[in-house]
């Protein structure tokens, strides 16, 4: 039996949010959906994880499991899904940009290396013809 909030609960419930100053637990997903007006609260039980804060630690895991399966929570997860997709899109766009930058950098580096090689070759050839003209004639 628990008399206080257990950090290990975070591992079991990904949506769990704990407010240290209020010593209350909330549902991150439902709070967000509620603040954005995407879900409506219809009962006291639903308000526990959104407005009031949950503090009944001894029945916590049972209540968390129940909340995770509640229609409010499902609705909140669903309503925020499109947002997650946009986030993923942005991050994949970001990854592409990073890749492009890396390709560009690689091209610049190759160009520099090419110029250096060219310069060395030119220098060598110039030296060779100079040596040829002056000492090998
Ligand atoms: Zn929830």
Image: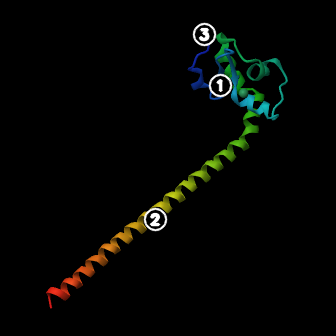
Q: From the image, which quarter does the C terminus lie in?
A: bottom left
Looking at this view, is 64 or 32 the one in front?
A: 32
Q: Residue at x 81, y 32 (%)?
A: 39
Q: Position of residue 44 (x, y in %)?
A: 81, 17
Q: Dot 3 corresponds to which residue?
A: 2
Q: Position of residue 105 (x, y in %)?
A: 47, 60
Q: Quadrant of residue 98?
A: bottom right
Q: How many marks?
A: 3
Q: Dot 1 corresponds to which residue?
A: 16
Q: Comparing marks 1 and 2, which lies closer to the viewer?
A: 2
Q: Dot 2 corresponds to which residue?
A: 108
Secondary structure beneath dot 1 equals strand
Q: Residue at x 45, y 62 (%)?
A: 106
Give how far apart the Cα atoms at labels 1 and 3 are.
16 Å
Residues at marks 2 and 3 touching, judged by CB atoms closer than 8 Å: no
Q: Quadrant of residue 125?
A: bottom left
Using a 10 Å C-alpha cutoff, classify the residue at mark 1 as few (fewer than 14 neighbours), some (14 to 19) or many (20 or more): some
């Amino acid at each position: 039996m628990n008399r206080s909030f257990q950090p290990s609960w975070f591992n079991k419930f990904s949506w769990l949010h704990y407010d240290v100053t209020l010593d209350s637990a909330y549902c991150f997903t439902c709070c967000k959906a509620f603040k954005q007006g995407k879900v409506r609260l219809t009962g006291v039980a639903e308000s526990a994880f959104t407005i009031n804060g949950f503090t009944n630690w001894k029945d916590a895991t049972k209540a968390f499991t129940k909340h995770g399966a509640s229609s409010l929570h499902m609705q909140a997860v669903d309503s925020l899904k499109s947002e997650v997709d946009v986030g993923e899109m942005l991050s994949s766009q970001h990854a592409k940009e990073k890749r492009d930058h890396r390709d560009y950098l690689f091209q610049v580096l190759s160009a520099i290396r090419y110029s250096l090689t060219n310069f060395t070759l030119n220098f060598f050839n110039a030296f060779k013809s100079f040596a040829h003209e002056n000492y090998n004639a």
